[in-house]
Image (cartoon, coloured by chain):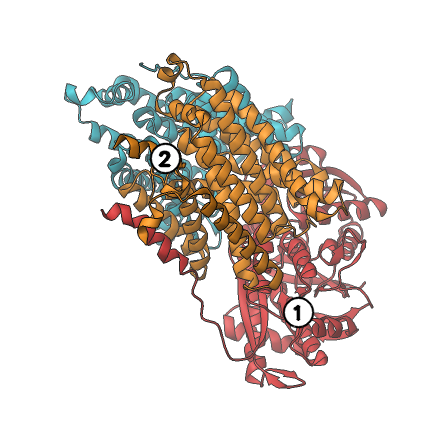
């Protein structure tokens, strides 16, 4: 039975599985099959997976250290909230909500593009600091815009994020990033991480790779932010500060850099632990970082560092291996 | 004119404290090329050390300063031994994440033990002198004086003593230095001890200037001091001092013209602009990448 | 070998999910959404103490008298960390997971406003003991009062009038400066309303400065304020910020009188503020010195149980719980709609903080306020203010 998990399944099986998951989500939503709270947790999990996988693209596959991901989340959250509360008020949520999410993603993606441009000249720790500056600028900027409520927050966002939508966006994110990573651009991104100068010497367009990585990463960060805003129904700049960025970083490094399965695992472990350890109160935030430190000491690349679960690997990679062996 | 002078004094006081903490970040980065994210929380905890010390044994100011600096130095070395040394050869990012984790552990342990803010007992009774329309408190003079003395001492140590030379050597080439017979581990531990001691001094002075201490104060101040270190050129001791005073000035003077919600926006925009034009900070040297 | 199987093992273990033991005995579940950690933990602690004292007494007397018979009340406590997003998440958890019939708190307006939105959309009664901001019970999109959110205290509209009149008439001060936390809902509203009322009554606001939550250094703002030479500095901000502001002001040589709002009310402020706050005035909901007989009993019970006198948050929480139980018993059912209907019917209630009068359709009681002074390290009652 375990052998079933060692090889990626055929396309038909995969599509059937995804359809089943979506159908299950619809059923749960329609008939209230699970507790409201479990539903809330599942949606949070989906959002965390999207955040984790998108940040892993820049931090894991490209080997940078971006601490500004919460800033992209903020942009997505606020823009999508503006669309659904201020600009397209009263529109049918069936087409309005995905539009709002996409608008949020695009807004984040545009800013991600700018950040990508900045990354041409700076790398490593200095890029990390630039991402930090970006995060703080976004947060402070929002605090000074009273149109979106300033520091006191944006109220009255509709509860649009449902289980089917979250599942759909999560699947879309995983699919997009997996395809990106195993494509020409993905190889270029990994080349940038391993040795940028050698890659340039070999003719790899590293600038394009960096831009693609930042734009895709920030787009999905914005998408996650939009889903987050429509789940919590209230957002304020305080939700998108360095603490939030740190949480996303913890998820990425916990699960393993450069691995989609690792991101899913890291997001799951983090979300579950956060809920399960609730009764501990503030000691929870002592235990969790301590576990992280211990994990780093014994497995510095995360639980699934740089390795991948076979289901996420495209079939042609397996075909090549079988041919050569 | 008086008003400007008053604000300038405020800026110098704030800048001194940022500079002391920024030095800790810069020294560790210079030697290990690692951002010690736990430093802000080490600074916070030193304020609590001071508070506990005064609760148990009300000692005079000088003694309290020395004891807390010592205690914080020991804490810095412990963190290095337990959390950073095993990761010396691991990917750099793991060390940074570990530093973040350590900082969180320290912060939340303090929060769990002391959920309420505490009032730091008064160590010295401040005397307020007035020069025309400008008020100068003896506390401000003390803070600036001690900070400058410590910074000069550190500068002297780094440039004129053998240990300082060893630290500079390690920051240039960590692999070759042990071949020359220099005990790298000891020097690195010493770097952390010095950084910790300076952070401890900053904690005591900060606690005296702003006597309400809470567990989350390390996060805000720590990140700002980190920004200051980067503005000046991280890894560069003089740059950290410059960055600290620059940031203090920007923060104080921004609030004089704009509402205070713009303060962070201006500080970080300034940081971004400086980094775009001088990617290694004001006094930093570009890192040479060997192919 | 081990490392290969590890990820599978971990995933399997985690899929077991959160295991929780659920109470099977029927009880009236009441949620508390309090500031137990964060910037103002003393407020949450007071609230929690008062609520626990009220309900343990109630349960000892048999519990809530519903139409189906007496049922014990069960308190489910959530921490909002004095952060708005956490308050919203805690409200979600209490209402959706714990399925409380009603929620008491949050206390700080920054938390109460978003929590109120959640309560209103999920149709669960919420009563905030201490939040004075008008927006808490107001549905801003509809422009009408919320149906499910109530409060146990007066609003900032009334408080601003009281303080402005006191400053002008009693303190005979014509020039006032204001320093407040611009990033938090409550101080912002209080500062703005004070400014409006003060200038309308003939006073002059000479400086209007802001800071951000978490700031420790106010020297820039205070230097500006000092240059304007006010008679009075109005500080509508929480007990953890005021001591630093007062100390820095005095060190800069500013001798103006400090006046505060009900955000000062925790006794922690004396512990943290010391001599710099001596002689300052502030507005409050409750004073132990002018207590009615019923209030005196509450004060002595609380002091006996917790070793310190109750502050206004405790007294208001006690009254909020009392109002809630009255609504439960009048409605007769352990059901959210019944509680809401009954609550909306309450016109008058006598609590430890005075007499509450509710107008139909409004969740805001009409009550009187007190002005207190910090003298010799204690809160001393100065005067009452009627609506």
Position of B32 compared to B249: left or right?
left
Query: How far from the left and from the top, in percent, is residue A266?
Result: 41, 46
Please state the chain letter of the residue tagged with numbered disc 1 in the rendered image.
Answer: C
At horizontal 48% and vertical 23% (from top left) the residue drawn is A210
State the red chain: C
Question: Looking at the picture, does residue B259 appear above or below residue C139?
Answer: above
Query: How far from the left and from the top, in percent, is residue C347?
Result: 79, 73
Is disc 1 on the same chain as disc 2?
A: no
Mark 1: secondary structure? helix
Please give the residue where the numbered disc 1 appears in the rendered image.
C320
At horizontal 30% and vertical 46% (from top left) the residue drawn is A294
Please state the chain letter of the residue tagged with numbered disc 2 in the rendered image.
Answer: B
- Disc number at residue A34? none
Query: How far from the left and from the top, in percent, is residue A209?
Result: 47, 23
Position of B204 compared to B70: left or right?
right
The residue closer to the viewer here, C306 or B276, is B276
State the cyan chain: B
The residue closer to the viewer here, C281 or A78, is A78
- Classify the position of the N terminus of chain A by image quarter: bottom left
Task: Estimate the spatial distance between the alpha carbons at disc 2 and disc 1, rounded to whole Å.
Answer: 48 Å
- Quarter of the rendering containing residue B77: top left
Q: How many marks?
A: 2
The residue closer to the viewer here, B261 or B202, is B261
Q: Is residue B4 visible?
A: yes
Please give the residue where the numbered disc 2 appears in the rendered image.
B96
Q: Is residue A258 visible?
A: no
């Amino acid at each position: 039975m375990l052998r079933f998990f060692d090889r990626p399944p055929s396309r038909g099986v995969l599509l059937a599985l995804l359809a089943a998951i979506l159908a299950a989500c619809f059923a749960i939503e329609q008939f209230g099959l699970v507790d409201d709270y479990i539903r809330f947790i599942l949606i949070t999990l989906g959002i965390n997976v999207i955040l984790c996988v998108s940040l892993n693209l820049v931090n894991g596959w490209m080997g940078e250290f971006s601490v500004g991901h919460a800033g992209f989340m903020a942009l997505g959250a606020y823009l999508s909230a503006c669309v659904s509360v201020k600009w397209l008020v009263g529109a049918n949520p069936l087409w309005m909500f995905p539009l709002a999410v996409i608008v949020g993603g695009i807004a984040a993606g545009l800013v991600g593009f700018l950040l990508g441009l900045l990354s041409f000249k700076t790398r490593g720790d200095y890029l990390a600091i630039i991402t930090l500056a970006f995060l703080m600028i976004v947060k402070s900027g929002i605090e000074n815009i009273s149109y979106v409520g300033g520091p006191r927050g944006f109220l009255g966002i509709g509860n649009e994020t449902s289980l089917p939508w979250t599942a759909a966006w999560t699947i879309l994110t995983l699919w997009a990033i997996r395809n990106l990573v195993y494509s020409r651009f993905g190889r270029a991104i990994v080349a940038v991480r391993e040795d940028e100068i050698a890659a340039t010497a070999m003719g790899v367009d590293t600038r394009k790779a960096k831009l693609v990585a930042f734009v895709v990463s920030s787009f999905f960060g914005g998408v996650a932010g939009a889903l987050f805003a429509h789940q919590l129904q209230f957002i304020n700049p305080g939700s998108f500060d360095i603490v939030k960025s740190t949480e996303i970083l913890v998820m990425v490094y916990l699960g393993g850099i450069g691995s989609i399965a690792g991101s899913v695992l890291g997001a799951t472990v983090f979300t579950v632990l956060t809920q399960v350890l609730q009764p501990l109160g503030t000691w929870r935030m002592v235990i969790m970082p301590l576990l992280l430190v211990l994990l780093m000491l014994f497995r510095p690349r995360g639980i699934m560092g740089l390795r991948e679960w076979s289901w996420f690997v495209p079939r042609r990679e397996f075909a090549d291996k079988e041919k050569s062996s | 004119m008086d008003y400007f002078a008053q604000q300038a004094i405020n800026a110098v006081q704030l800048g001194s404290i940022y500079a002391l903490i920024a030095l800790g970040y810069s020294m560790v980065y210079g030697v290990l090329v690692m951002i010690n994210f736990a430093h802000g929380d080490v600074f916070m905890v030193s304020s609590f050390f001071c508070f506990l010390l005064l609760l148990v044994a009300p000692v005079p100011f000088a003694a309290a300063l020395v004891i807390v600096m010592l205690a914080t130095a020991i804490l810095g070395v412990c963190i290095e031994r337990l959390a950073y040394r095993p990761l010396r050869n691991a990917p750099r990012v793991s060390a940074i994440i570990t530093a973040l984790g350590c900082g969180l552990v320290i912060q939340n342990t303090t929060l769990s033990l002391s959920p309420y803010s505490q009032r730091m007992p008064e160590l010295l009774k401040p005397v307020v002198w007035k020069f025309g329309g400008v008020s100068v408190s003896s506390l401000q003079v003390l803070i600036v004086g001690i900070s400058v003395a410590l910074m000069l001492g550190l500068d002297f140590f780094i440039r004129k003593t053998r240990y300082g030379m060893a630290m500079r050597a390690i920051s240039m080439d960590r692999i070759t230095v042990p071949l020359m017979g220099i005990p790298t581990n000891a020097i690195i531990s010493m770097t952390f001890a010095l950084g910790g001691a300076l952070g401890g001094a900053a904690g005591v002075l900060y606690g005296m200037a702003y006597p309400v201490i809470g567990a989350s104060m390390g996060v805000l101040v720590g990140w700002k001091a980190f920004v200051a270190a980067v503005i000046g050129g991280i890894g560069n001791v003089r740059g950290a001092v410059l960055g600290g005073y620059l940031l203090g000035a920007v923060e104080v003077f921004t609030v004089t013209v704009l509402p205070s919600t713009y303060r962070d926006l201006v500080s970080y925009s300034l940081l971004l602009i400086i980094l775009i034009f001088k990617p290694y900070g004001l006094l930093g040297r570009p890192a040479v990448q060997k192919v | 070998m081990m490392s290969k199987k590890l990820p599978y093992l971990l995933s399997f273990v985690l899929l077991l999910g959160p295991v929780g033991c659920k109470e099977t005995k029927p009880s009236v579940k009441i949620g508390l959404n309090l500031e137990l950690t964060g910037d103002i933990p003393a407020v949450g602690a007071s609230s929690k103490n008062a609520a626990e004292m009220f309900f343990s007494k109630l349960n000892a007397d048999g519990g809530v008298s519903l139409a189906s018979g007496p049922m014990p009340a069960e308190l489910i406590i959530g921490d909002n960390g004095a952060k708005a997003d956490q308050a919203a998440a805690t409200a979600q958890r209490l209402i959706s997971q714990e399925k409380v019939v009603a929620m008491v708190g949050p206390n700080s307006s920054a938390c109460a406003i978003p929590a109120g939105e959640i309560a209103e959309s999920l149709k669960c009664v919420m009563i905030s003991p201490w939040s004075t901001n008008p927006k808490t019970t107001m549905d801003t999109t509809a422009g009408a009062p919320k149906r499910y959110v109530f409060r146990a205290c007066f609003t900032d509209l009334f408080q601003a009038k009281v303080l402005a009149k006191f400053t002008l008439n009693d303190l005979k001060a014509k020039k006032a400066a204001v320093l407040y936390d611009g990033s938090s809902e409550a101080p912002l509203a209080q500062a703005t309303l004070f400014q409006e009322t003060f200038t309308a009554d003939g006073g002059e606001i000479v400086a209007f400065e802001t800071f951000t939550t978490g700031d420790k250094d106010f020297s820039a703002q205070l230097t500006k304020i000092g240059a304007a030479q006010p008679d009075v500095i109005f500080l509508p901000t929480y007990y953890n910020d005021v001591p630093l502001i007062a100390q820095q002001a005095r060190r800069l040589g500013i001798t103006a009188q400090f006046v505060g709002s009900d955000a000062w009310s925790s006794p922690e402020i004396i512990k943290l503020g010391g001599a710099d706050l001596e002689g300052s005035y502030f507005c409050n909901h409750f004073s132990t010195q002018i207590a009615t007989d019923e209030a005196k009993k509450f004060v002595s019970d609380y002091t006996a149980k917790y070793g310190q006198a109750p502050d206004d948050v405790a007294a208001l929480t006690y009254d909020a719980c009392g109002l809630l139980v009255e609504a439960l018993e009048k409605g007769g059912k352990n059901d959210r709609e019944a509680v809401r209907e009954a609550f909306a019917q309450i016109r008058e209630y006598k609590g430890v903080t005075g007499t509450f009068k509710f107008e139909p359709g409004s969740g805001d009681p009409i009550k009187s306020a007190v002005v207190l002074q910090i003298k010799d390290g204690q809160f001393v009652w100065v005067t009452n203010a009627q609506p």
